[in-house]
Amino acid sequence: MRVTDDIKYVGVNDHQVDLFEGQYVVPRGMAYNSYVILDEKIAVMDTVDQHFGEEWLANLAAVLGDRKPDYLIVQHMEPDHSANITSFLGAYPDAVVIGNAKTFTFMEQFYGKNPSMKKQIVKNGEELCLGKHVLKFVFAPMVHWPEVMVTYDSTDKVLFSADGFGKFGANDVEDPEGWACEARRYYFGIVGKYGLQTQKLLKAAAGLDIQVICPLHGPVLSEDLGYYLGMYDKWSSYTPEEPGVCIAYTSVYGHTKAAAEKLAELLRAKGVKVAISDLARDDMPEAVEDAFRYDRLVLATTTYNNGIFPFMHTFIEHLTEREYQNRTIAIIENGTWAPVAGKLMKAMFEKSKNITFTETTVTIKSALNADSEAALEKLAEELAG
C-alpha cells in the first residue's frame, strides 16, 4: 500500500487474536503496521507480531524488489512490533538496527545477545539522512513504555507515531463505528495512565508540519489531522469529551440493576446522553472508555463481604490507575443490613484530582422502595442540572 511516493506500507492484519495484550477483546482483529521508506538508503520502520514473520518478510521483499534495506528503525520494543527483528536480520544481515539505549537493553532482555548485529544508538532530536528524506527521532518515554520514540520525516511530512494514534481492529475490516470508538478504547486501555507524557509528545509534535500520521496499529491518518490531534489532546488532558453520564453497576439479585436502569430511564427522559454497563457481563474496557468519554459517572453496587463487590472494585482500580479526574461521580449503594459500599468507593478516589461527588447518594436496603425511588429522582435532577 502506498503512503507517499517513497513510503510504502508492509504491515499485516491479525484475525486470529482473541485478546490483545491478554485482556482486550478485539472482535475485528488487529493490525501490526510496518513501513518502508525508499530512498538512496532504505529504512524499515518496525517489524510485526511473531506469528506473521513470513507474511511480513514477503510484503517487505515485494516492495524492495532487488534492493536491500540499510536500516531497521525500532521505535517500540513491545513484542507485537519487535518480534521479527531476529528474522529480519537473518534475511538482511548487513542492515543497521537503529534505536535508543533503552531499546537495545530491552532487545537483549527479550531476544538475547546478538554479537553480529550492527546497531546505531540515537539520541533525542538526532537526525538520519537517507538521501532526500531526513528523519528526526523524538523520544516519547512512557507513551507507553520508557524506550518509545517517534520518527518524523521532514521531506514527506510524515509522523511515524509508534503506538500513538493507534486503534483496535484490522485494517482490512470496515469499522462501522469509525475511528474514535476503538481508538478511544485503545488509548484509555493502554496509554491512558500516561496523559502527562502524551501531552509532552503533543507539544513536541505541535512544532512539526505533519500531513500524515503512521501509527503502529490502525489506519494511516492523512485527512482532518486536527480532529485526531484534538481528540488526543482531550484524552491525554483528561478533559471530558462530551456531556453525558456513564452508569456502571454490579448486581447480585437484580435490585441494584433495577436502580441503575431506573436512573438511566429518568436521565434519558431529561435529554441526557447515557451509557450503561453491567460490569460483570459487559466488556469492562468499554465501560472504562465511557467513564472517560463523559463528564459524569454513576457507580452502583452492593456491599459484599463488608466491602465492594469485586467487579466494581476492579473497575474503580482501572479508573484510578489511569489518573481518572475532572469528573462528577454519583453513588448508588445497596446493602441488606450494613451498606458500606458507598463510603468505600468514595475512599478509592481520595488521591484522584478534581473529583466532585453529588450531594445525593442513593442507599438501597435490599430492594427499591418509595424512599429510594424518590432519592433516584433527586439524583437524576442533580445529574441533569
Image (cartoon, grey):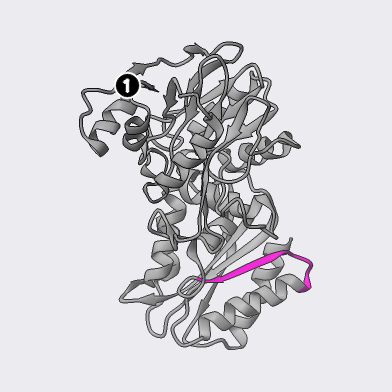
- Residue at 63% from the left image edge and 24% from the top image edge: 6
Q: Quadrant of the N terminus?
A: top right
* SS type, badge 1: helix
Q: Is residue 67 above or below residue 161?
A: above
- Residue at 66% from the left image edge and 73% from the top image edge: 264
The quarter of the picture where residue 72 lies is top left
Q: Is residue 316 above or below residue 121?
A: below
Viewer can see residue 357: no
The quarter of the picture where residue 224 lies is top right
Please state which of residues 311 and 176 is positioned toward the viewer in this rendering: 176
Is disc 1 surrounded by few (<14), some (14 to 19) or many (20+) residues within 10 Å? Answer: few
Q: Which residue is mark 1?
A: 101
- Residue at 24% from the left image edge and 32% from the top image edge: 108
Residues rendered magenta in the picture: 269-278
Q: Position of residue 256 (x, y in %)?
A: 52, 80
**Was residue 304 drawn as part of the magenta stretch in this picture?**
no
Counting labels gives 1
**Was residue 271 drawn as part of the magenta stretch in this picture?**
yes
Please state which of residues 212 and 225 is positioned toward the viewer in this rendering: 212
Q: Position of residue 150 (x, y in %)?
A: 50, 27
Please state which of residues 120 and 147 is positioned toward the viewer in this rendering: 120
Amino acid type, label 1 = Ala
Q: Position of residue 194 (x, y in %)?
A: 46, 38
Q: Quadrant of the C terminus?
A: bottom right
Q: Locate residue 267 relative to residue 336 in the image: left or right.
A: right
Q: Is residue 322 above or below residue 363?
A: above
Viewer can see residue 378: yes
Q: Locate residue 192 relative to residue 179 in the image: left or right.
A: left
Q: Locate residue 130 relative to residue 1 in the image: left or right.
A: left
